[in-house]
Amino acid sequence: MTMVPVFPGKTPSESTPGAQSKASAIASVPLLRCVALVRSSVRSARRLVAQNRVYINGQRAQDENVMVSNADSVTILQKSKRSVVHLEAPPRCEYYLKLYKPYGVICSHARDVADVPIVSDLYPPGAEECHNVGRLDRNSEGLLLFTSDGFFTRAASMPETHIEKEYVAKVSALDGEPFHCNDQILQRLLQGVDLGDGKDLAVALSVELMMCDAHTATLRLVVSSGRYHLVRRMLAALGS
């Protein structure tokens, strides 16, 4: 089974595996990071924003994830000391990169096996500090996001955000048996599949049968969970 993640409006044929582009740098950071660098912890920074004690350019901050730059004036009201501490957003550039991971490349930054390609081999200049947001196994290919922004990675990876991920999966029957892909299988994917791991049913938000013949089928699935090898395990549980 081969899986290809696809972003809306972009098909696998429109992306070239391993294609590189210069990493784009953004000279701004989330407000939470700016405050945390001074207050020593994210928890303390989040509490200050919730208590309406953080201001951006004189306006009370409403969103802890709003981006601020060095051109912004960020202030914290020290309630206990009746004083105001002026902060500057740290002079740091974050990098965000879209990269199409080819088949056979491992989502790792450490080479455990000689001559086995890893994703950092594909990085363009300027992306040395980046890490992958999510991952694909060695036998899958597709578009991934990479960034140096840990706040972005955590926000995009938290289960409660329910960020949708789209896959194209090519499946085939075992041992040359006739392949069957009918509405019943599609409905089971939508209703939920028991993966036998003691967790909730794995559910596809949408499923589309793109192609089906006597031996193989191509499905487009959208899921919001980030469980390990989710799509492979869902299809395997149905006997695909």
Image: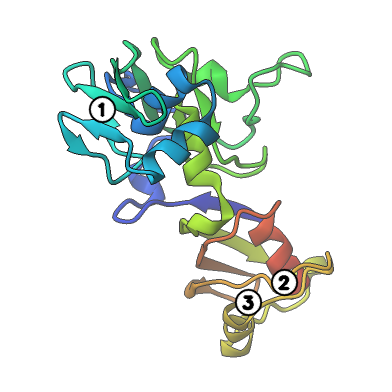
Check the image and report above or below for 178 versus 18.
Answer: below
Left or right: residue 123 versus residue 34 is right
In this rendering, the answer to whether 226 lies above or below 201 is above
Q: Which of marks 1 and 2 is in front?
A: 1
Q: Give the residue type at disc 3.
A: Ala
Disc 1 from disc 2: Cα separation? 39 Å
Residue 43 position in % (x across, y down): 54, 36
Q: Is mark 1 on a helix, strand or loop?
A: strand
Q: Identify which residue is drawn at 50% across, 36% down.
A: 153
Locate residue 216, reporting x and y percent.
62, 68
Q: Residue 68 carries which label?
A: 1
Query: Do the residues under discs 3 and 2 have CB atoms within 8 angstroms?
Result: no
Is residue 20 visible in this depiction of the protein?
no
The x and y percentages for residue 24 are: 30, 22
Alpha carbon distance from label 3 to label 1: 56 Å
Mark 2 = which residue? 200
Graded by Cα atoms within 10 Å as few (under 14), some (14 to 19) or many (20 or more), the crowding at tag 1 reads many
Q: Earlier in the sequence, mark 1 or mark 2?
A: 1
Name which of mark 3 and mark 2 comes first in the sequence.
2
In x, y percent, where is residue 59?
Answer: 17, 37
**What amino acid type is highlighted by mark number 2?**
Asp
* In front: label 3 or label 1: 1
Confirm or deny contact between disc 3 and disc 1 (CB under 8 A): no
Q: How crowded is mark 3: few (under 14 residues within 10 Å), some or many (20 or more)?
A: few
Horizontally, residue 215 falls left or right of residue 161, namely: right
Label 1 sits on what residue type?
Val
Q: Circle 3 is placed at which residue position?
A: 214
Q: Nearer the viewer, residue 82 or 7?
A: 82
Report the quarter where the C terminus lies. Answer: bottom right
Tell me: residue 214, above or below residue 62: below
